Amino acid sequence: MKKNLYPLIFLLALIVLPLLLRQEYYQHLIILFMMWVIIGSAWNLLAGYTGRVSFGHAAFFGSGAYAAGLLTYHYAISPWWGMVTGGLLATAVAFPFGWITFRLRGAYFALATLALNEVLKDAAKIAEPLTNGMVGILIMPTFSSKLPYYYIILFMMVLTILCMRLTVHSKLGYYFISIREDQEAAESMGINTTRYKMISLCIGTFWTGLAGAFYMNYMGFIDPSVVFSLQDLSIAAVLVGIVGGVGTIYGPAVGAFIMIAVQEFFRSGFFGLFKYFADKTGSSAFTTVSEFVKTAHTLGFGLLVIFVILLLPNGIVGDWPKIKRKVFRIKPEN
């Protein structure tokens, strides 16, 4: 009962929060957090439950973003129609890719996703008549307030988590886990492992493409280096899953919250601490350090990942009983 109560309380808090917290800066951070919950959950279904790690999830995010943007750029169709189209295009990209690469074993699938991301990124740069190349695609935002975007992404996040929860606790989920644990044993029991890996990939990429389409609508601008970014999207998706807890339903939410918090902590220069010292002392050293810190959010999050891997190999949610026992001195219930 408690396991279901906590998510409901958290959901109610998110519904009420923008009505109390009216500053658009904080609303923006929460919107990014919820978008990353979707991306992290989609990645986690494939990697955490099916055991196939993707290093190029930005390929599907970018496909969804361009599906929404190109409708407006070429046909003057509202990019909101591209929301579902974004998910479908990402799935259409994933299907032939998965059909070929899922026949590979070991780390080859992860390397293939990395290559796919770079191929799509270069294709978006080269195909200027279609994608406008590095100039990118710019659209006018539909809403002047962040509140509509807030509730749209909240609705999408809830649907994503419900989809992942229902999938994992269905027959599909058991097939996914059996493939993750021992593919040869799953095949010996008559499970078509290629088919179920394909299903896992298509479900995950649909939601990732949907998140990309939302990003196009929300930010109003995309270019290949932004939506196909290896560091800021593909690797970040992996880190969100690892920190929160791979193979858990709510792990990506925890990982997304921590990632956004760490990014903002560094981007603001430790909430303006170094800038404050620079202004007070007039020292150029503090100014230099402040500029470095603002660009070092990936380094900070990477160090956090190393810490989690060493001490909490199952992530924060996966090792929550250990945290309660070691930190809060709460003994597990019998």
Image: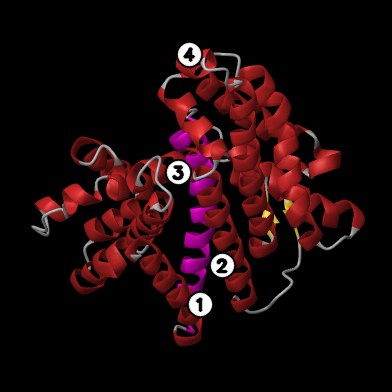
Looking at the picture, how far across and down is residue 233, in whole percent? 52, 44
Mark 3 element type:
helix
Q: Nearer the viewer, residue 110 or 196?
A: 196
Marks 2 and 4, the one that precedes in the sequence: 2
Marks 2 and 1, the one that precedes in the sequence: 1
Q: Nearer the viewer, mark 4 or mark 3?
A: 4
Specify the label residue 184 is tagged with.
Answer: 4
Q: Are marks 2 and 1 in contact (CB under 8 Å)?
A: yes
Mark 4 element type:
helix
Marks 3 and 2, the one that precedes in the sequence: 2
Identity, as a three-letter code, of the amino acid under mark 2: Leu
Rounded to the nearest whole Å, what is the CA distance between mark 4 and mark 3? 31 Å
**In the rendered image, is residue 106 in sight?**
no
Q: Residues within 10 Å of mark 2 (few under 14, many from 20)?
A: many
Q: Nearer the viewer, residue 64 or 289?
A: 64
Q: Are marks 4 and 3 in contact (CB under 8 Å)?
A: no
Marks 3 and 1, the one that precedes in the sequence: 1
Looking at the picture, how far across and down is residue 142, in whole percent? 74, 72
On the picture, is 225 further left or further right than 77? Answer: left
